[in-house]
Amino acid sequence: MTDLHDDVFAVSPDIRYVAVATDGRVTTRSRADLADASAAESDLYEELLVNPTLITLAGRRGDIDCGGLDHLIIGYGHFHQLVIPLTDGHLSIAFELPADPAGHLPAIAALLATHGHLRRVRPSP
């Protein structure tokens, strides 16, 4: 079986960074040739604190009457961050600014299914 990080990077040359946070563990990988890259420690705190908090907040709103939370796109100054909630954590992908993260959702969803990760998109019972 191939590595999820490698498979996500293969989706587009515009992908800068991939993080998989599952069961309380975070694994990250960045392209080597990045301009304006964030510090590794900053990336780790984003995956441990910021993204789970945003998923919780937006997910609770989505669960009220919006059909759940499918994904978040955060527009930072140097890149766009796509965050996809999973049943056991989240997937975080940074894209170069000209890229359209939402346009890559079908390919990324297929990879998640191939790798056995379930997306959390429906309201909790």
Image (cartoon, rainbow, N blue to C red):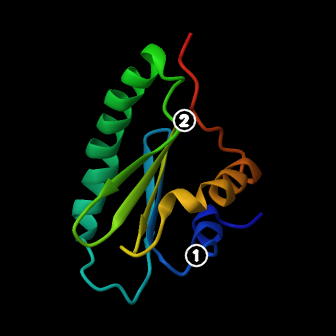
The percent position of residue 103, horizontal first and vertical second, equals 57, 61
The percent position of residue 92, horizontal first and vertical second, equals 44, 55
Q: Secondary structure at mark 1?
A: loop
Q: Residue at x 59, y 62 (%)?
A: 104
* Left or right for 70, reference 32: right
Quadrant containing the N terminus in the rendered view: bottom right
Q: Quadrant of residue 53?
A: top left
* Left or right for 67, reference 95: right
The percent position of residue 89, horizontal first and vertical second, equals 49, 39
Q: Secondary structure at mark 2?
A: loop
Q: Circle 2: is it few (<14), some (14-19), or many (20+) Cα within 10 Å?
A: few
Quadrant containing the C terminus in the rendered view: top right
Q: Quadrant of residue 64?
A: top left
The percent position of residue 44, horizontal first and vertical second, equals 30, 57
Amino acid at pointer 2: Asp
Disc 2 target residue: 88
Residue 12 — which label? 1
Earlier-in-chain disc, 1 versus 2: 1
- Pick whichever, 80 or 46, lies toward us: 80
- Is the C-beta separation of discs 1 and 2 under 8 Å? no
Give the alpha-carbon distance from disc 1 to disc 2, as whole Å.
25 Å
Question: Which one is closest to the eye, mark 1 or mark 2?
Answer: 1
**Residue pushed farthest top?**
125
Q: Circle 1: is it few (<14), some (14-19), or many (20+) Cα within 10 Å?
A: some
Q: Is residue 84 above or below residue 37?
A: above
- Count of number-bearing discs: 2
